[in-house]
Image (cartoon, rainbow, N blue to C red):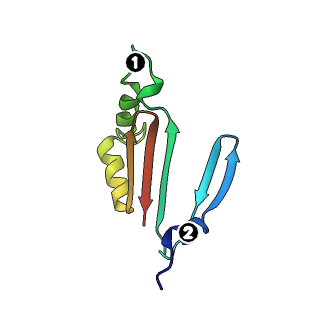
C-alpha cells in the first residue's frame, strides 16, 4: 500500500516563530549535506503607489546585482564555486527568494 506522501510530509514539518511575524518552517529530509531555503516577504507591486508601482520589481532585480564587496560576476562565481544558487522574484503581493547549497 502506498503511503499518503502529503500527510507524511506535513506531519514532519516543524514550525517556530522566530520573532513576532516571522515564522520558520523546517523539514529534515533524507538528503545529506543539501540545504534549501524558500521564503517570501510582503513587498509585491500591490504595495506600491501609482508613482512607484515598479519599485518591487526593481528591488528584486537589484538583489541580483552584487554587494559592496563583490560585483555581480564575482558574486555569481563565488557562489557557483561553492555550489550555491540564489534566486529572487516578485509577485503581486510578495518578494520571493530561494537558495540552495550543496
Q: Badge 2: how crowded within 10 Å, few (<14), some, or many (20+)?
A: few
Vertical comparison of 47 with 21: above or below: above
| Label 2–label 1 contact, CB within 8 A | no
Query: Is residue 11 rendered to the left or right of residue 68?
Result: right
Distance in Å between CA atoms under marks 2 and 1: 42 Å
Q: Where is residue 92 in the image (x, y as percent from the top left)?
A: 41, 33
Vertical comparison of 14 with 50: above or below: below
User: At 34% from the left edge and 58% from the top edge, which residue is drawn?
Assistant: 80
Q: Which mark is residue 28?
A: none
Q: Where is residue 51 in the image (x, y as percent from the top left)?
A: 39, 13
Q: Name the residue under label 1.
A: 52
Query: Is residue 19 rendered to the left or right of residue 4?
Result: right
Q: In which quarter of the image is residue 71?
A: top left
User: At 41% from the left edge and 39% from the top edge, which residue is drawn?
Assistant: 67
Q: Position of residue 30 (x, y in %)?
A: 50, 77
Most distant residue in the left direction: 73
Vertical comparison of 13 with 73: above or below: below
Q: In which quarter of the image is the C terminus?
A: bottom left
Q: What element carries label 2?
A: helix
Most distant residue in the bottom direction: 1
The one nearer the camera, 100 or 25, is 25
User: At 45% from the left edge and 38% from the top edge, which residue is drawn?
Assistant: 95
Q: What element carries label 1?
A: loop
Most distant residue in the top direction: 51
Q: Which of marks 2 and 1 is nearer the N terminus?
A: 2
Q: Name the residue under label 2.
A: 7
The one nearer the camera, 19 or 7, is 7
User: At 58% from the left edge and 61% from the top edge, which residue is drawn?
Assistant: 26
Amino acid at each position: 500500500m502506498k503511503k499518503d506522501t502529503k500527510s507524511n510530509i506535513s506531519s514532519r514539518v516543524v514550525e517556530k516563530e522566530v520573532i513576532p511575524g516571522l515564522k520558520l518552517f523546517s523539514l529534515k529530509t533524507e538528503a545529506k549535506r543539501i540545504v534549501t531555503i524558500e521564503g517570501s516577504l510582503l513587498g509585491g507591486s500591490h504595495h506600491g503607489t501609482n508613482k512607484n508601482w515598479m519599485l518591487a520589481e526593481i528591488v528584486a532585480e537589484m538583489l541580483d546585482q552584487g554587494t559592496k564587496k563583490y560585483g555581480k560576476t564575482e558574486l555569481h562565481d563565488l557562489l557557483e564555486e561553492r555550489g550555491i544558487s540564489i534566486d529572487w522574484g516578485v509577485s503581486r503581493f510578495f518578494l520571493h527568494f530561494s537558495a540552495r547549497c550543496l
